Image (spheres, coloured by chain):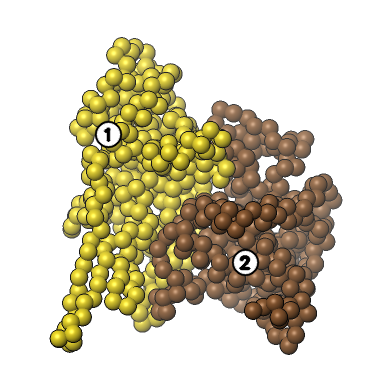
Chain colours: A brown, B yellow
């Protein structure tokens, strides 16, 4: 029995207790899956759970909990569960109203990575055969090594079959078999450059920014969306101009607001229509927070996030170095 | 389709090089590293891009198959545009009176016009729809008109159809050159030119030396015939062919149904779909002032934004994303049909491709149509 079958069986058992269930369903487009919202038992058969389920469905849970009275069920990968944990630890969700259905994961493919590898060629079909991805582009079949195209987070994932928190857990017998990689290797490459080179790199990236705010809206932890400072007219904090400077400025605000909250699900980078490597920024901020406050977001409900509390003396921050 | 002219594949590069001496040429360039395709100025691309081209980072392919990531609308309707500078002038002798001085941005057009090479037929349709908004009707929009004036749209017919293409469902087709100035079709070892508008005659005469004098018209026409017949069949038929007026009637009937809540449950209400859309034309005006000096900017706005309809009173008539998405679809499939007689969606599928949560406008329209039948 595959995880998908076990998941459907489980959901069939509990669907009557739920007001709504968020899950994945198949999409007409290759490489993608659809988030679906189901209420009825007959829709359960349409659910899927496979290696294309890269979306973090925790994105929906905050708004959903405001809308519905009863319990919302949500299908999560173990890494997505940490986003929910973070929301819970900040008191933004009601534990009673959230039913976390966590399915063990054997890694998800990052379609952006496949696209980047093929230089932005449009992908028409995708099949997984003997550890190889058969990717169809126009008039061509590309055989790619599947092990290279997992989402970045999969390469340092340690919880694929051990979710930190769940209500229902569906174990995955399939081992991911992904060779672990150094999480901070790409940051080290950037940081080894001079300040000017780093600035040029980011200017080049943000010259593409169109300020569509897909990064902000897809983030499971950015709950301020409609009240975001960039939408305000009074006070007018940020110019509405769409250019490198403003894109970068907005992103800096976003990174600061998510420091100590970001669970590094990588949704912002996936959502970006112009492929700006936003996850690198998030990773850096999480690294700094971990060093300064010994805190990793999305691990425990009871641990207070560093910016939601106050300490007289911070162990790792030497005051004399601050000036 | 009748072949009017023919240009050999090996002449394309030198031809563009030559044309860029007289016209401002824009063409789609593939950025290999970041997997985006964008319209770039040929000269900028040659100047800064040649090094990158040599290293394989950026590449121009005349026969490129994919659509550009962004639609070409930003060439005429930029994401940010300064309309004018203003300055308040105070008079010491008469302190109650304040003068205002305006300086409009200077025109920088010294070219006879832009040449947009390598548009898809749907891109040209999109520009034609924007023309209706900015160039016809109540008043001509100078800022748009100055950029659009004299520009030549060179479309290349689509031999390849992608899973998100649906131009035939909204009145277009992969070889529709109605709105292009020059219509080209890639055939074996060259490009057949099947449409030359009045606008483009100068360009064709200017590039006479690159056009083949003798070509086998009959054989090429047969090849084109086959292409035309096979390509539009590949498009998935989400709904039966509907006239724009019928579509508007269907939308009207569904305005107060619950189907919109179902459609939008997964939408995250970002602006990616509107910004890549070739027909979305909403903008926001804003004065940015510091002390006595300031500028007025016009920037793209998106209707999925909460503050798009937020009123000064604090009331928002479209507070929920379902209301916003309903407006978005109706704007394209209803209101603009009544205003401009055309579906304001050209079926390019960019919004479908870039949506991070797989929203599909075809799916939405189909759901509305089926909801209506029940």
Q: Residue at x 48, y 52 (%)?
A: A208
The residue tagged 1 is B22
- Which percent across, then down, holds residue B267? 52, 61
Q: Residue at x 21, y 67 (%)?
A: B102
Tag 2's secondary structure?
Answer: loop
Which image quarter: residue A215?
bottom right
Q: Residue furthest left?
A: B93
**Within 10 angstroms of label 1, few (less than 14), some, or many (20 or more) residues?**
some
Viewer can see residue A17: no
On what subunit does the disc labeled 2 rest?
A
- Which percent across, then down, holds residue A109? 69, 47
Q: Quadrant of the N terminus of chain B?
A: top left
| Figure check: B164 above or below A154 | above
Tag 1's secondary structure?
Answer: helix
The residue tagged 2 is A220
Q: Quadrant of the C terminus of chain B?
A: bottom left
The answer to whether marks 2 and 1 sit on the same chain is no
On what subunit does the disc labeled 1 rest?
B
Q: Residue at x 45, y 74 (%)?
A: A237
| Figure check: B109 above or below A303 | above
**Residue nearest the viewer, comparing B314 with B74:** B74
Give left or right: position of B17 versus B370: left
Which image quarter: residue B191?
top left
Which image quarter: residue B221?
top left
Give left or right: position of A205 versus B293: right
- Which percent across, then down, holds residue B144? 26, 52
**Residue nearest the viewer, comparing A250 with A18:** A250
Viewer can see residue A200: yes
**Residue nearest the viewer, comparing A245 with A263:** A245
């Amino acid at each position: 029995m595959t995880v998908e079958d076990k998941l459907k069986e489980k959901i069939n058992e509990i669907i009557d207790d739920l007001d709504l269930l968020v899950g994945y369903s198949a999409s007409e487009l290759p490489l993608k899956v659809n988030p679906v919202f189901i209420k009825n038992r007959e829709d359960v058969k349409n659910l899927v759970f496979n290696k294309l389920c890269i979306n973090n469905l925790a994105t929906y849970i905050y708004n959903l909990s405001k809308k519905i009275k009863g319990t919302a069920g949500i299908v999560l990968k173990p890494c997505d569960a940490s986003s929910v944990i973070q929301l819970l630890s900040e008191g933004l969700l009601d534990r009673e109203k959230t039913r976390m259905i966590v399915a063990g994961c054997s890694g998800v493919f990052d379609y952006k990575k496949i696209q980047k590898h093929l230089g932005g060629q449009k992908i028409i079909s995708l099949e997984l055969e003997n550890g190889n991805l058969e990717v169809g582009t126009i008039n061509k079949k590309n055989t790619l090594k599947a092990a290279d195209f997992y989402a970045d987070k999969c390469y340092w994932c340690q919880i694929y079959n051990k979710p930190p928190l769940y209500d229902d857990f569906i174990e995955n017998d399939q081992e991911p078999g992904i060779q672990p990689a150094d999480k901070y290797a790409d940051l080290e490459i950037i940081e080894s450059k001079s300040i000017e080179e780093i600035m040029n790199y980011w200017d080049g990236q943000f010259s593409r920014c169109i300020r569509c705010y897909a990064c902000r809206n897809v983030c499971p932890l950015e709950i301020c969306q409609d009240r975001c400072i960039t939408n305000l007219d009074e006070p007018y904090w940020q110019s509405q101009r769409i250019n490198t400077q403003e894109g970068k400025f907005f992103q800096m605000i976003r990174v600061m607001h998510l420091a100590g909250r970001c669970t590094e699900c990588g949704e912002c980078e996936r959502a970006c229509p112009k492929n700006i490597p936003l996850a690198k920024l998030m990773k850096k901020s999480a690294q700094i927070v971990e060093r300064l406050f010994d805190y990793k977001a999305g691990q425990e409900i009871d641990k207070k996030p560093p910016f939601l509390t106050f300490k007289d003396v911070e162990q790792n921050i030497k005051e004399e170095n601050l000036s | 389709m009748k072949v009017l002219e023919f240009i050999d594949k090996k002449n394309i590069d030198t031809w563009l090089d030559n044309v860029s001496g007289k016209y401002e040429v824009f063409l789609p360039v593939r950025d290999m590293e970041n997997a985006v395709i964008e319209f770039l100025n040929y000269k900028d691309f040659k100047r800064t891009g040649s090094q990158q081209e040599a290293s394989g980072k950026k590449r121009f392919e005349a026969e490129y198959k994919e659509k550009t990531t962004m639609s070409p609308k930003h060439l005429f309707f930029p994401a940010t545009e300064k309309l004018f500078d203003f300055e308040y002038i105070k008079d010491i002798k008469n302190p109650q009176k304040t003068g205002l001085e305006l300086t409009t941005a200077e025109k920088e057009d010294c070219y006879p016009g832009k040449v947009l090479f390598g548009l898809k037929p749907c891109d040209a349709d999109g520009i034609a729809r924007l023309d209706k908004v900015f160039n016809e009707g109540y008043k001509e929009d100078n800022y748009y008109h100055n950029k659009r004036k004299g520009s030549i749209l060179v479309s290349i017919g689509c031999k390849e159809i992608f899973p998100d293409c649906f131009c035939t469902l909204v009145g277009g087709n992969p070889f529709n050159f109605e709105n292009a100035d020059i219509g080209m079709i890639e055939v074996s070892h060259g490009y057949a030119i099947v449409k030359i508008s009045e606008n483009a005659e100068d360009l064709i005469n200017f590039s006479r030396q690159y056009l083949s004098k003798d070509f086998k018209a009959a054989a090429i026409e047969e090849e084109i015939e086959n292409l035309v017949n096979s390509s539009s069949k590949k498009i998935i038929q989400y709904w039966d062919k509907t006239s724009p007026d019928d579509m508007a009637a269907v939308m009207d009937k569904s305005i107060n149904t619950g189907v919109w809540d179902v459609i939008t449950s997964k939408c995250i209400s970002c602006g990616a779909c509107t910004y890549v859309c070739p027909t979305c034309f909403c903008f926001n005006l804003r004065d940015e002032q510091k002390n006595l000096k300031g500028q007025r900017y016009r920037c793209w706005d998106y209707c999925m934004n909460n503050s798009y309809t937020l009123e000064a009173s604090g009331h928002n008539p479209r507070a929920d994303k379902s209301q916003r998405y309903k407006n978005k679809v109706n704007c394209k499939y209803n209101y603009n049909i009544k205003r401009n007689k055309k579906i304001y969606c050209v079926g390019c599928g960019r919004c479908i491709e870039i949506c991070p949560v797989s929203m599909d406008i075809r799916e939405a329209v189909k759901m509305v149509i089926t909801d209506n039948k029940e």
